[in-house]
Image: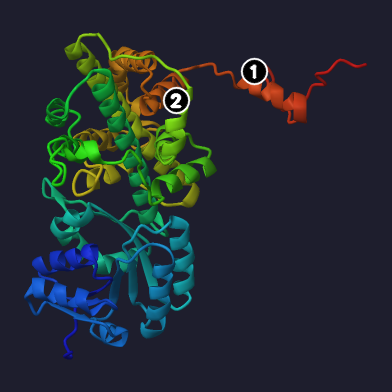
């Protein structure tokens, strides 16, 4: 090591950490990396081939190599590993230094860590990063939150390395505390919802309409070229062309139908419940990943439970057009539910979100980037107080025009015995929101009957209780 001071430090030199370092190097920033595995440091130095990048396995050397205020970014697994690194860093840092947690930490953990290190006169930024390995290398979407003064130190680096759309960097300061990690959590919840909807379309097209892998590729490629276009649709089209090196079949056809999760979608669902906010599509997507894991029980149920048989005999072209329109409504509701959750969280936790800005940075780099996000940005820029995305008059008219197709697709799935839980959830949410009268009055009456929980009336203010059982 020399006496040189580097612009930023990176703790964790796995694929994500190394790619972020190389991205920073490409934009003129120097970086010192730290990892307990010396081979990771060696690989990074060999790939960088520049004195702008160095690595060490000694934490004292790592901290000593940073320019003040020292900025140490962590790209390590969420949970205890983050706490372990912070515990080691804190006694080595000085007043005003900055720790940047770039992992998928739960926002409540970020709040706890921020309060803890604030007592040491240090700053912690909770930063969501989306885009995967390629995004980290070429330009991710970056979602930072925490002390504003600390963000200003890292802002030039983040704005340089982030993805850019129309010249705008896909990063912005999102708010105090855990604002950044909360946005990343909801981003992942929306991602779950969109993936479930796409999976629903795949199941209906394959089992119901009889499309083969080449035809599925063609449909998703066509959808990606217009209003449904986005990263998830793009990669879905590509997936159906990939050949398995072992069997020489299409790889999709040899992948087990069990989907895992790392928890971020579940966290989004759980906190929405804490906020008393309905996000049924996200809830359904989480539940379906869980259900997919019961493959043994599903096989037994298939043996015992009967259902309709045979593919659809309808006109394929017409059915695909209807499915396209159903997917459009589903996409709108996926984003709408996530945006509504962030708006509720902003009010409850004091984040101060500007939804138009969140839509703006999501247009590039992240997993849920899509052409539709520019429309969302414009809607919230014009109507910052809009409570639900689908209450925009123009968008509401579009959904109303296509809702018959959504109903048809849900009905088709039911007739064929093909589960379409994402679309069923969306249709239920659509109809519930447009209902001026819901049967919750019966639920109020039931609760008062069995538990004296009281109820409210439509003709008089206050709370009331009735003795429902006749006197004996």
Q: Quadrant of the C terminus?
A: top right
Q: Quadrant of residue 291?
A: top left
Asked whether residue 7 appears in the rendered view, the answer is no
Name the residue carrying label 1: 458
Q: Extreme top residue here?
A: 314
Q: Quadrant of residue 76?
A: bottom left
Where residue 208 sits: x, y (%)?
28, 19
Single out the residue that lies furthest toward the left: 49
Which quarter of the figure is the N terminus placed in? Answer: bottom left
Of the pair 22 and 339, the residue shown nearer to us: 22
Is residue 460 placed above or below 339 in the rendered structure?
Answer: above
Q: Residue 407 sits in which quadrant?
A: top left
What residue is rendered at 19% in x and 84% in y? 5
Residue sitting at x 11%, y 45%: 166
Instruction: Indicate left or right for 264 with 237 as reference.
Output: right
Picture layout, residue 164 above or below residue 236: below
Which callout, 2 or 1, points at the residue further toward the start of the chain?
2
Disc marking residue 28:
none
Q: Is residue 129 left or right of residue 27?
A: right
Instruction: Look at mark 2 in the image and give the residue it sits on.
Output: 303
Residue 354 at x, y = what percent?
A: 33, 45
Q: Residue, x 42% and y 26% (percent of image)?
A: 425
Answer yes or no: do the residues labelled 2 and 1 have beta carbons within 8 Å? no
Looking at the rendered image, the disc whose residue lies closer to the viewer, 2 or 1, is: 2
Q: Residues within 10 Å of mark 2 (few under 14, many from 20)?
A: few
State the residue in front, 56 or 259. Answer: 259
Q: Give the camera-side residue of 404 and 337.
A: 404
Label 1: how many residues lie within 10 Å, few (<14), some (14-19) or many (20+)? few
- Residue 177 drawn at (x, y percent): 42, 60
> Helix, strand, or loop for circle 1?
loop
């Amino acid at each position: 090591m020399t006496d040189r001071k580097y612009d930023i430090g990176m703790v964790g030199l796995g694929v994500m950490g190394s790619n972020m370092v190389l991205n920073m190097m490409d934009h003129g920033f120097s970086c010192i990396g730290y990892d307990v595995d010396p081979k990771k440091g060696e690989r990074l130095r060999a790939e960088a081939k520049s004195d702008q990048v160095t690595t060490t396995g000694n934490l004292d050397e790592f901290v000593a190599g940073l320019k003040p205020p020292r900025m140490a970014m962590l790209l390590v697994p969420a949970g205890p590993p983050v706490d372990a690194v912070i515990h080691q860093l804190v006694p080595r840092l000085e007043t005003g230094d900055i720790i940047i947690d770039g992992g998928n930490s739960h926002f409540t953990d970020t709040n706890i860590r921020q309060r803890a290190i604030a007592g040491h006169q240090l700053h912690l930024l909770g930063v969501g990063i989306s885009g995967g390995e390629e995004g980290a290398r070429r330009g991710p979407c970056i979602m930072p939150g925490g002390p504003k003064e600390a963000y200003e130190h890292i802002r030039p680096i983040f704005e340089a390395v982030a993805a850019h759309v129309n010249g705008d960097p896909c990063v912005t300061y999102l708010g105090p505390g855990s604002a950044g990690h909360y946005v990343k959590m909801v981003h992942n919840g929306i991602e779950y919802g969109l993936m479930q909807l796409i999976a629903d379309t795949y199941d209906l097209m394959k089992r119901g309409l009889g499309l083969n892998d080449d035809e599925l590729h063609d449909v998703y490629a066509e959808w990606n070229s217009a209003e449904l276009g986005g990263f998830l649709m793009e990669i879905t089209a590509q997936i159906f062309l990939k050949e398995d090196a072992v069997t020489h079949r299409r790889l999709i056809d040899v992948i087990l139908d069990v989907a895992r999760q790392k928890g971020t979608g579940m966290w989004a669902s759980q906190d929405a419940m804490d906020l008393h906010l309905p996000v049924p599509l996200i809830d359904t997507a989480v539940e379906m990943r869980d259900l997919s894991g019961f493959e043994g029980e599903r096989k037994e149920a298939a043996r015992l439970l009967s259902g309709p048989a045979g593919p659809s005999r309808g006109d394929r072209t017409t059915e695909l057009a209807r499915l396209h329109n159903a997917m459009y409504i589903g996409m709108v509701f996926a984003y709408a539910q996530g945006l509504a959750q962030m708006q509720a969280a902003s009010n409850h936790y004091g984040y101060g979100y500007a939804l138009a800005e969140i839509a703006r940075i999501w247009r590039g780099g992240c997993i849920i980037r899509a052409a539709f996000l520019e429309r969302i940005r414009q809607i919230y820029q014009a109507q910052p107080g809009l409570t639900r995305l689908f209450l925009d008059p123009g968008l509401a008219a579009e959904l109303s025009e296509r809702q018959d197709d959504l109903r048809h697709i849900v009905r088709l799935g039911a007739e064929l015995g093909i589960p379409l839980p994402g679309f069923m959830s969306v249709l239920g949410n659509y109809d519930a929101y447009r209902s001026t009268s819901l049967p919750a009055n019966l639920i109020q009456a039931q609760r008062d009957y069995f538990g004296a929980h009281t109820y409210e009336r439509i003709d008089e203010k206050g709370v009331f209780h009735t003795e429902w059982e006749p006197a004996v």
